[in-house]
Amino acid sequence: MRRHSCCYNQKLRKGLWSPEEDEKLLMHITKYGHGCWSSVPKQAGLQRCGKSCRLRWINYLRPDLKRGTFSQEEENLIIELHGVLGNRWSQIAAQLPGRTDNEIKNLWNSCLKKKLRQRGIDPVTHKKIPEAEKGSGGEDNDNRNQEKTAEASSNELNKSDDATPYVQNRASSMSCHHHSDFMGGFPIQMINHASSSSDSNSVNWYSHSSGRSFDINTDFPFNTTSILTPTTATNLFLPTDSSFLYKPSFSSSSNSPENISNTAPYGLKEEQYQIHMSIEELEELSSKWDEYYYYLHNPVSMLASSESFCNEIKPDIHHLVPDTPGPIMLPHHNNNNTKFQEPSQMASFFSKDIQKLTAAFGHI
DNA sequence: AACTGATGCAACCGCTTTTCT
DNA sequence: TAGAAAAGCGGTTGCATCAGT
């Protein structure tokens, strides 16, 4: 079993950090930056391993940390994000400026899981817990076991995950909730709120790349209660922010053209971003989703045909977003920033994505 | 007042991923 | 391109504190 090289050094201190150590580390990093973490303890005069210093800095000393209790909005957001991302704490933390993954993980394990159970919601699947299970004795132990199993399988899926940006966008780029009990509706609700909001900042939390820090209480304008409202609409949307210039969305619950909304990318005239799509095209796109949905429930079939499926769906995406420079989700043969340019890459991407969606929306 | 169990938090451990050489 | 080192991540553990008895 491989161990981190610094861990072999028996002289190194472990355990809680003293104020003096904190001060040394803080002074050092403030003055010189951390550079290579393994050299930090030596340079700062600390008997710690670099890993420990890094952790201490990230979780405690960083000046941008927001200490104190979590607000209700933050808690709700964590629950929502967990419904989509699972135990990917660092990605959840990325959406909560000033909060660390460790902090969020602790909050989840100590508090939020409990709250969800009290609301009759399984913290792993984010589904409602059936009445029969609620009343049974030894519920806690059973849940813990189920949780471990579910999380383990979820982690298995997570292992096949790739580039971070997709994870960010999985929630926002394409989702379906035919009958969402609770969390499954989250991404759509977020987008719907965002797209109806005049404040373009309202979607900033989608963006990993924007780098903009925001205050959860002021930059998160939609109320979280409505986020949780279940919906039966099937939606397809494309996120917007610095990475995503377009934010079209539609709801298949209505075929009226006025429900097809486009939001202008910043600084572009309407004719530059106008998306032309007929009802027939929308329906066709919707049927693609049905196919996608089918694969969610038939992963073997999906794997067998993912490539052809992706090849098929790709033109639709193009159609939706003509000449979009969006670098992540939307393949385009003219775009150098495009992450996936070859069908096989697309297939790989969708296969992984479907696995993730299956994990996230397994209750569909 | 002393004990005990529950809880929350900080830190560690082991593994994976990314970067460097 | 391969191997090593560093960074990052998530699960787990240990300890301090608090509430209940």
Image (tube, coloured by chain):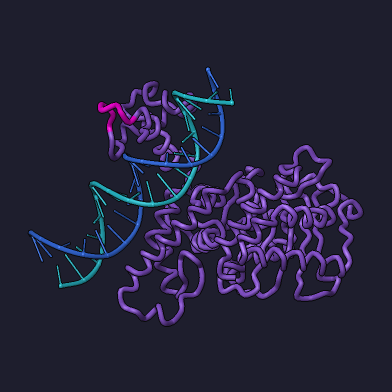
Chain colours: A purple, B blue, C cyan
User: Residue A335: percent from the left, percent from the top?
Assistant: 80, 40
A248 falls in the magenta region: no
Q: Furthest residue to the right?
A: A271
The residue sitting at 44% across, 28% down in the picture is A37
Quadrant of the rendering where the N terminus of chain A is positioned: top left
User: Residue A84: percent from the left, percent from the top?
Assistant: 57, 60
Would you say A204 lies left or right of B19 here?
A: right
Count of numbered labels shown in the rendering:
0
User: Residue A51: percent from the left, percent from the top?
Assistant: 40, 33
The residue sitting at 63% across, 54% down in the picture is A353
* Residue A160 visible here: yes
Would you say A130 lies left or right of A234 here?
A: left
The residue sitting at 71% across, 46% down in the picture is A344
Q: Nearer the viewer, residue A139 or B1?
A: A139
* Residue A205 visible here: no
Residue A22 lies in quadrant: top left
Residue stretch rendered in magenta on the structure? A7-13
Q: Provide the major secondary structure of the magenta segment.
A: loop
Would you say A271 lies left or right of A196 here?
A: right
